[in-house]
Amino acid sequence: MSKEILQHMTFHHIGKPVPLDVIKDDISTRYSPLFDMYTLDRLNELSLPIQLHAFGEASELHEIIKQQSHVAFKVSNIREALKGQEIIMPLYEPFSGYQCAMILVNRQPIELIETSLSEREIWGDGLFKDSKLYP
């Protein structure tokens, strides 16, 4: 990854795998049949966006994604940022205006995001209506 891309990375969120019983009963938990994955967004007193993820047996995501926490960063050009990287989740667009992929850096999963959406649009209600990830 070039120094120019690194200089333009902005923190976006932390993703943490948890056992399904930790989040399954929360009414805000969303299910993704695409990845057999459950997600619950959690805010905290530091206002750090943290996503809790649980995975079903049919999930075909890379084992590292299912076992390790990841940090997500926004980049201005995701295709450039992915060049030469070890990709563990290919680039895709889970919903309009938002592209993401995951790479492995020193055995640490890192999510890269390119989006034209505001943080309010991303984390707010109703965004996932036309989502491939959370139909």
Image: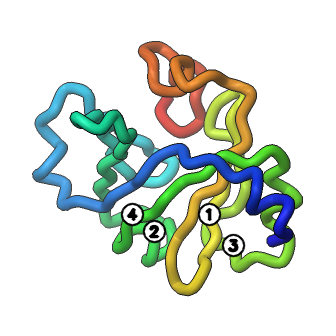
Q: Say few, some or many: other residues with alpha carbon within 10 Å of mark 2 (under 14 / 14 to 19 / 20 or more).
A: many
- The residue pinned by badge 4 equals 58
Helix, strand or loop under label 2: helix
Q: CA distance from mark 2 to mark 4?
A: 14 Å
Task: Inspect the image, locate mark 2, and give the three-letter code of the amino acid beneath it.
Answer: Ile
The picture places residue 109, in percent across and down from the top left corner, at: 52, 71
Name the image quarter holding residue 64.
bottom left
Front residue of 33 and 73: 73
Q: Mark 2 or 4, which is nearer the eye?
A: 2
Task: Inspect the image, locate mark 4, and give the three-letter code of the amino acid beneath it.
Answer: Ala
Question: Does any portion of residue 42 appear in the rendered image?
Answer: no
Evaluate if marks 2 and 4 touch, with contact meaning CB atoms under 8 Å apart. no
Point out the tag, 2 or 4, that comes first from the N-terminus. Answer: 4
Say whether residue 121 is left or right of residue 59.
Answer: right
- Kindly identify the residue that appears in the image at 80 percent across and 71 percent down: 1
Q: Mark 4 or 3, which is nearer the eye?
A: 3
